[in-house]
Image (cartoon, rainbow, N blue to C red):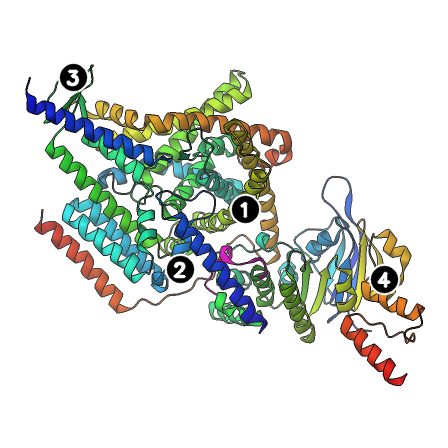
């Protein structure tokens, strides 16, 4: 065997170990916002264009709700602010690391997926301006993964589960956790499309991204599911009238 | 007399808050629920009096060039230029600046590794690591690409935070309004921006009160507490939504949310220097292509 | 007989849960009056205010402003002329800079921009907060926010200003600031209605007191008459103002002569004592 390769192997291991060490010291797991600068201009535009139909649908549905009931404007804004605040809170963790919910699963269950696309877009803008999570050029891609795909998946699972008469709290857990998980799949795919692997193309690259983010994102999805259930239980016990109020935001829980 | 007293009280309060947030930011990490440090810095920035449209357009053009030209020299020029503006011109402390710049560091490290390292059943790279079922491999070219990508990402982030660290969100929304973003979205953004801070306050009070009663003593309790605080927060926010609508109606709101905006001067000097920097980036990009 | 600026006639309102929040309220309010609206929590004060401003629409009854009955068409006139300073500043402030916040009302009045700016600056200097102009409300203290909400209403140049429990949650310094502003507004001939649980404040500030209990007005008169009426105090769960007790004790113990010149503040009492003891 070539000894020089062996040295290179050792160096490589050292690098990997060093990186692992860095992870140990930066235990910050955000929801997967693609950062500014990661996507080439073409991808930024393409993802933005893909979001447009969903945003228009959301916009129209909001306009309609507002026309029927003008008071909804402050309610919608509060819903948006709520999702933002929820996503900026440090959630409980076993390891002492610091991570956040996305809140989009809960949002989709409570308010329906249509307004969430617009509210999600606005929340993403504020996350990038106020918290430096995500970015302006990656807004399209992030909107697609976090304000369209995730909420739609969560809402779909929620409705399907209710139809199948599965226990409601289990359904809420699955909707929130899988919604989160789906966002993570989409984000990995978005990154892989922009950075295909030399050896295996987009598919291999997707696997790489999934693998790299799995240690933070999979526990996060599970915790998101649990917390969403706890929140829903809380709401059911002492906020039934308020939940009915939300009914006209094309209703979730009733 | 009474007024000067009020002012001095307020000054103490402001500086306390600043101190708190700066110390909070000396370590890498970010805030949880205390409010947004970036928002606070934006109000304190010396660049706040600059015309917001100029700042938004300038930082966006810089950002686009940084990504579009995809050139390490341009990236470095952007990093230096933006740091100069934010720290030296804007008066933000270097420590605070770096801590904001480092907020997305986890994503950057992980994302960049995934791009730079590849996987195959054969040792086909310059550097290979056998894992039993296949090889992780990379090459000098790949590592260089990783380094350049990191430069580009930091350039892009510094261009964006130049804007966010000097322009309060309400002014950015004003620029979006001038750019003909639909009215409903602008109205929602204005309200959401205000409500975020209201809900943060409510949350902090609830969290502190839960904490004082041992609500976060272990993981399971923390989860229950977090859940009840979060659901309570939603109930409070819905009630506040109604109260707000009432208060808006009482002041003559009839369906159009229009705010008075301050017009800020646009000195020729800014325009010329801004344009020069943009042209410099383009020439630099072409020359070092 | 002078014309009331605001005339409320047999107002009924219910929030839809069966119990009437307002149960036949009739009251005439005259220009320049300083009225304290008192009564326990849930007695209908805030509901009355929101009806008076036209935010809530009464089930029965009518409101006239300067002789004109208010209907859907002239509702804007009513809102323009009757301003409310809400109890919680954080439920009122909606803009992200103080300037935009104070300008919100004038903008809704569709005034030209120059006039809006002029009014905003006037209102801010009135409240001594002109240097807060570009500040966001989320970095203001409670007392500062209260001043902003008062400036909100001043900028609308309302004839009648309603304060919903303005002294709640204010520190002594800010409470004193508030009273100074109230005196200043009173000197300018503004009509003011203030709901409060602070009977001492009501006693020294108001010229007229209206007592609410379970959606009805159970008393309407001078603060002195009302606070001397034990039946009403009991029915509305009110305390007597300390100065009234002190004065009556002094009279009872024959320490001062009963001149019917009731002091409402320690300063008044001091003047009274000095006057009486000079003659004694």
Which residue matches tag 3?
B121
Q: Secondary structure at mark 3?
A: loop
Same-subunit check for callouts 3 and 4: no
Closer-to-camera residue (B200/A97): A97
Any mark on residue A74, and which?
Answer: 1
- The quadrant holding residue B254 is bottom right
Residues under labels 1 and 3: Cα distance? 57 Å
Q: Secondary structure at mark 1?
A: helix
Residues under labels 3 and 2: Cα distance? 55 Å
Residue range corresponding to the magenta coloring: C133-143
Which one is earlier in the sequence, the residue at label 3 or at label 2?
2
Residue at 30 percent of width and 36 percent of height: B107
Chain of the residue that carries numbered disc 2 in the rendered image: B
Same-subunit check for callouts 1 and 3: no
Which residue matches tag 4?
C227
Q: Above or below — where is C88 with respect to A45?
A: below
Q: Nearer the viewer, mark 2 or mark 4?
A: 2
Closer-to-camera residue (C233/B60): C233
- Tell me the quadrant of the picture where the C terminus of chain C can be found: bottom right
Coordinates of residue C7 in the picture (x, y in percent): 76, 62
Question: Is A215 included in the stretch rendered in magenta?
Answer: no
Which residue matches tag 2?
B44
Q: Secondary structure at mark 4?
A: helix
């Amino acid at each position: 065997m070539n000894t020089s390769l062996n040295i290179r192997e050792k160096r490589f291991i050292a690098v990997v170990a060093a990186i692992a060490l860095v992870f140990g010291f930066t235990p910050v797991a955000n929801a997967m916002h693609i950062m500014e600068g990661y996507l080439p201009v073409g991808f930024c535009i393409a993802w933005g264009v893909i979001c447009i139909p969903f945003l228009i649908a959301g916009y129209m549905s909001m306009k309609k709700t507002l026309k029927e009931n003008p008071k909804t404007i402050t309610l919608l804004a509060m819903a948006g602010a709520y999702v933002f605040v929820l996503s900026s809170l440090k959630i409980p963790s076993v390891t002492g690391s610091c991570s956040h919910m996305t809140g989009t699963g809960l949002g989709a269950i409570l308010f329906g997926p249509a307004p969430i696309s617009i509210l999600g877009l606005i929340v993403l803008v504020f996350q990038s301006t106020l918290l430096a999570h995500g970015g302006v050029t990656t807004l399209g891609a992030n909107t697609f993964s976090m304000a369209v795909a995730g909420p739609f998946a969560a809402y779909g699972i929620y409705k399907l589960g209710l139809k199948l008469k599965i226990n409601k709290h289990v359904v809420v857990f699955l909707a929130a956790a899988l919604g989160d998980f789906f966002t993570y799949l989409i984000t990995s795919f978005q990154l892989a499309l922009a950075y295909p692997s030399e050896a295996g193309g987009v598919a291999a690259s997707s696997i790489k991204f999934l693998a790299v983010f799995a240690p933070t994102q999979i526990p996060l999805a599970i915790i998101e599911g649990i917390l969403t259930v706890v929140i829903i239980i809380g709401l059911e016990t002492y906020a039934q009238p308020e939940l009915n109020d939300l009914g006209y935001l094309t209703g979730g829980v009733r | 007399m009474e007024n000067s007293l009020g002012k001095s009280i307020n000054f103490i309060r402001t500086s306390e808050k600043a101190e708190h947030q700066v110390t909070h930011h000396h370590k890498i990490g970010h805030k949880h629920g205390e409010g947004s440090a970036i928002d606070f810095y934006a109000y304190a920035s010396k660049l706040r009096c600059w015309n917001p449209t100029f700042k938004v357009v300038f930082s966006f053009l810089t950002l686009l060039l940084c990504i579009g030209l995809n050139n390490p020299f341009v990236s470095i020029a952007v990093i230096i230029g933006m740091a100069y503006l934010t720290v030296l011109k804007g008066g933000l402390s270097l420590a605070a600046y770096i801590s904001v710049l480092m907020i997305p560091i986890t994503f950057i490290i992980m994302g960049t590794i995934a791009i730079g390292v590849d996987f195959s059943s054969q040792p086909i790279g310059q550097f290979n690591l056998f894992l039993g079922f296949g090889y992780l491999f990379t090459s000098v070219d790949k590592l260089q690409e990783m380094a350049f990508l990191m430069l580009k990402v930091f350039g892009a982030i510094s261009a964006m935070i130049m804007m966010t660290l000097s322009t309060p969100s309400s002014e950015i929304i004003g620029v979006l309004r001038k750019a003909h973003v639909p009215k409903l979205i602008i109205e929602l953004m204005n309200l959401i921006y205000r409500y975020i801070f209201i809900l943060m306050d409510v949350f902090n009070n609830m969290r502190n009160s839960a904490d004082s009663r041992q609500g976060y003593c272990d993981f399971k309790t923390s989860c229950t507490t977090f859940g009840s605080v979060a659901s309570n927060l939603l109930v409070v926010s819905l009630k506040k939504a109604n109260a707000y609508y009432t208060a808006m109606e009482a002041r003559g709101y009839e369906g159009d949310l229009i705010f008075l905006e301050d017009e800020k001067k646009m000195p020729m000097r800014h325009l010329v220097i801004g344009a020069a920097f943009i042209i410099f980036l383009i020439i630099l990009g072409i020359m070092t292509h | 007989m002078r014309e009331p600026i605001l005339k409320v006639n047999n107002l009924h309102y219910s929030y839809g849960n069966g119990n009437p929040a307002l149960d036949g309220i009739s009251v005439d309010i005259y220009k320049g009056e300083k009225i304290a609206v008192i009564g326990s929590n849930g007695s209908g004060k805030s509901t009355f205010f929101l009806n008076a401003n036209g935010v809530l629409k009464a089930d029965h009854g009518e409101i006239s402003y300067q002789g004109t009955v208010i209907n859907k068409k002239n509702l804007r006139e009513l809102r323009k002329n009757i301003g409310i300073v809400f109890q919680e500043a954080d439920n009122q402030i909606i803009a992200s800079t103080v300037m935009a916040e104070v300008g919100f009302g004038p903008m809704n009045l569709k005034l030209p921009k120059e006039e809006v700016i002029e009014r905003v600056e006037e209102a801010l200097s009135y409240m001594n907060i002109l240097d807060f102009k570009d500040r966001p409300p989320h970095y203001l203290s409670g007392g500062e926010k209260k001043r902003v909400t008062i400036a909100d209403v001043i900028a609308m140049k309302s004839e009648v200003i309603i304060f919903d429990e303005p002294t709640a949650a204010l520190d002594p310094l800010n409470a004193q600031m508030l009273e100074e502003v109230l005196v200043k507004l009173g000197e300018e001939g503004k009509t003011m209605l203030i709901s409060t649980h602070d009977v001492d404040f009501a006693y020294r500030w108001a010229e007229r007191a209206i007592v609410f209990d379970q959606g009805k007005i159970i008393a309407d008169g001078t603060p002195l008459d009302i606070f001397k009426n034990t039946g009403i105090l009991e029915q509305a769960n009110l305390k007597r103002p300390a100065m009234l007790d002190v004065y009556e004790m002094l009279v009872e113990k024959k320490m001062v002569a009963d001149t019917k010149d009731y002091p409402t503040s320690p300063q008044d009492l001091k003047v009274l004592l000095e006057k009486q003891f000079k003659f004694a």
